[in-house]
Amino acid sequence: MSLQELKAKLKNIKSEDNNSNKLKNNFRSYEELKKDLKEIEMNVTTDSELLKNLFNEFEVYEDSIVAGTLEKNQIDDIVQIFNDFEYLLHQVDNAQIFADMNGMVKIISPCLNTTNEDIKMEALRVFGTAVQSNPKVQLNALKNHFVQKLLHLLTSNKNKLSLSSRCLFALSALVRQFPAAQKILFDHGGLAIFSNILKDGHLQLQLRVMKLITDLAIERENIKKTEDTTLREQKIREYVKTEFGRNLITNKYCKALSNTINHNIQQSLSIDSTMEMYDFFEVTLENMITLSPICKYEFRNPENNLLKMIKSMMDYYSVLNDTQEPEDIEMFENLVKQITRLRTSIFENTHDEL
């Protein structure tokens, strides 16, 4: 190796050493890292601590909520607290912590009793989020009489569409997959209230009611798919206690359902509001098909003109299907299939319902 080559090598080594030192300077030392990590650890807040903080924030406004003396900025603060609650309560464990901290009584109940509609709406939203598909929280709500509270709220605000709709959302979340709550719902006149909604309630509320009743009927059908014999028999015993079929009939839900579709099909045919009514008829027909084993005799009652209505719908939508744009054809074909299923189902043999 020549002298010049050796000098070049030494120069490169020095350059690499300098770069290495620069690189080291860009990173923190081990002691610095330990210090930073300790600070981060101190700033970590668990979800339970966040919930506790929200409880404390809410407590500041509790007296004003009860007294009905909230100012605009206070209402905004409470709405934000509920937004934070909802974000946390989507987690099943957090919802259970909320219930264990007596959130149903301390947070939800006072807000349902306030005169401020916005706060009621937010409380119902958070309640529905907390109980949805969460058996432990559902049980907590049941023990604190929330089925009765929600039914009272629903009947006392029947002319307030948004509030009533939110109330039905909360009630549905509480009773789905929970036969004990369903029994309380039926025992306290829930189905009679639902029948009245079908009779003269807003379309949006009717849709919520019918979707819920369809789901409750499907729950009972799905018991048959439970493979574990002991569990299946236990579920059957629980659902039998609700007397679902008998309550539907005695509270005239079947009759109200027949009248609802009759009224709306006549209105639809007269004003040609085909697209607007499609969702309504889809939900209504599904509800009727699902309940046909229970409601068959009521559906067959000549006074209801149900068979005449079915024929009118079949004729109308079959013809309409031929005049639609390609993207709408499938929609109307599905509706015709549902009408056909309903016509078939009301002539099938009845069987026992839970």
Image: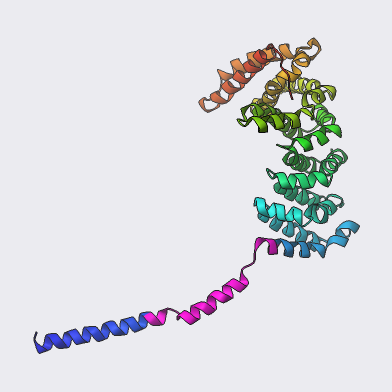
Span colored in magenta: 24-50
User: How many tags in the picture?
Assistant: 0
Residue 314 shown in magenta: no
- Residue lying furthest left in this view? 2
Asked whether the viewer can see residue 274, the reply is yes
Residue in front for this viewpoint, 213 or 122 = 213
Residue 157, x across and y down, in percent: 85, 41
Residue 39 shown in magenta: yes
Residue 222, x across and y down, in percent: 65, 29
Quadrant placement of the C terminus: top right
Image vertical order of residue 314 relative to residue 145, above or below: above
Image vertical order of residue 319 relative to residue 47, above or below: above
Image vertical order of residue 67 relative to residue 21, above or below: above
Residue at image coords 91%, 58%? 67
Q: Quadrant of residue 350?
A: top right
Q: Mostly what secondary structure, the magenta segment?
A: helix
Asked whether the viewer can see residue 276, the reply is no
The type of colouring in the image is rainbow
- Residue lying furthest right in this view? 67
Residue 205, x across and y down, in percent: 76, 35
Image vertical order of residue 310 relative to residue 94, above or below: above
Quadrant placement of the N terminus: bottom left
Residue at image coords 66%, 61%? 47
Residue at image coords 71%, 44%? 135
